[in-house]
Amino acid sequence: MTARDYYEILSITRTATADEVRKAHRKLALQLHPDRNKSKDAPARFNEVQEAYEVLSDADKRKRYDEFIRLGGSPGSFASNAQAAPPTNGGSPFGGGWSGQPRGKDQWTGADAQTFETIFGDIFGNGGASGRGPRGAGARGEQHTRSRERTQYEIHVPLDTVLRGGKFAVAIDGEQHELTIPVGLADGDVLSVPGRLDAVVHAHIADHAWLTRDELDLSYELPVSIVEATLGGTVDAPLPTGGRISLKIPAGSPSGRKIRVNGKGIPARGKGKPGDLYVIVQIVPPKDPNQLTTQLLENIRGMIEDPRARCAWNRG
């Protein structure tokens, strides 16, 4: 549990957008991940970042947190496993949780995780801060460190599952557990394990066979013929989430040209804007052209402008 302000931890303003929150978390999580950062304070700072992101990435939790701070509460007393009580203004500002007089630290001494979950769970909804809310096939969870008495695991979720949502099986201590992967899971999201309050899972998005990911945007290379690239036309192209679209190739398209398809990238959680899909033109010359094709190409060879004529290094 951190005593620092969640916005300060992520180095963002209180008016930061959901996308800014996500980007700040991703940057810090990569910097402080215990597998990459071997400094002594990295695990504690990493957990601090995860705790801040868990609240600020959820619109409802963020609203409650902002109200809690506005009413005089300290960041350290917001988390559901906190030892200190919230400000005494007639009860919890969240419509649940504590009410009445503040409870001293000694009143909760010795309470187990399930007790904390039961008492404080309704502040965050189902689960509380001691169990990460559902974010998030089959794989083994890779154990990498132990922090706050909760064993940390890593999994790599297929991009197809992130695009459509679904279930992901993970083995922990020889037992199979099924995690729910929401549509739009972000790389680095933290998942809880049903029935295992002593374990937490860090989800990463696995590489895809033909799609490349950049935050919420996706891209892939689309082979086109010389004729299609030169004259333009409409071609059949696949969508990451399934199905196909008729994609217009502009006349004179070079290899590497990006054609944007709005909103067809990775869906954003909540009311956020989904990413875009970028289809990259890749010109494929004819393979083993027959005699007729070769003759046609020879006939137009002299009619086509030399593509190198306008290069800066060829202007003499």
Image: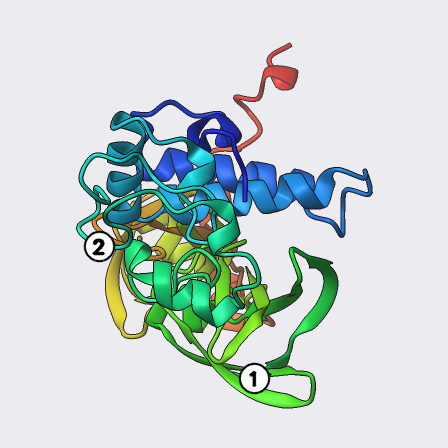
Which residue is under mark 2? 96
Residue 138 badge: 1
Image height of 219 relative to 199, above or below: above
Looking at the image, which is closer to me, 235 or 192? 192
Q: What type is the residue that disc 1 sits on? A: Gly
* Neighbourhood count class around disc 1 (C-alpha, 10 Å): few under 14, some 14–19, many 20 upward: some
Where in the figure is residue 120, as x and y percent of width and height?
Answer: 36, 58
* Neighbourhood count class around disc 2 (C-alpha, 10 Å): few under 14, some 14–19, many 20 upward: some
Q: Residue furthest bottom?
A: 175
Left or right: residue 15 versus residue 3 is: left
Viewer-nearest of discs 2 and 1 = 2
Q: Is residue 138 visible?
A: yes
Left or right: residue 38 versus residue 191 is: right
Q: Are marks 2 and 1 in contact (CB under 8 Å)?
A: no
Image height of 127 relative to 272, above or below: below
Q: What type is the residue that disc 2 sits on? A: Gly
- Quarter of the picture holding the C terminus: top right
Q: Secondary structure at mark 2?
A: loop
Q: Earlier in the sequence, mark 2 or mark 1?
A: 2
Image point (21%, 49%), residue name: 271
Where in the figure is residue 313, as x and y percent of width and height?
Answer: 65, 17
Image point (25%, 51%), residue name: 263
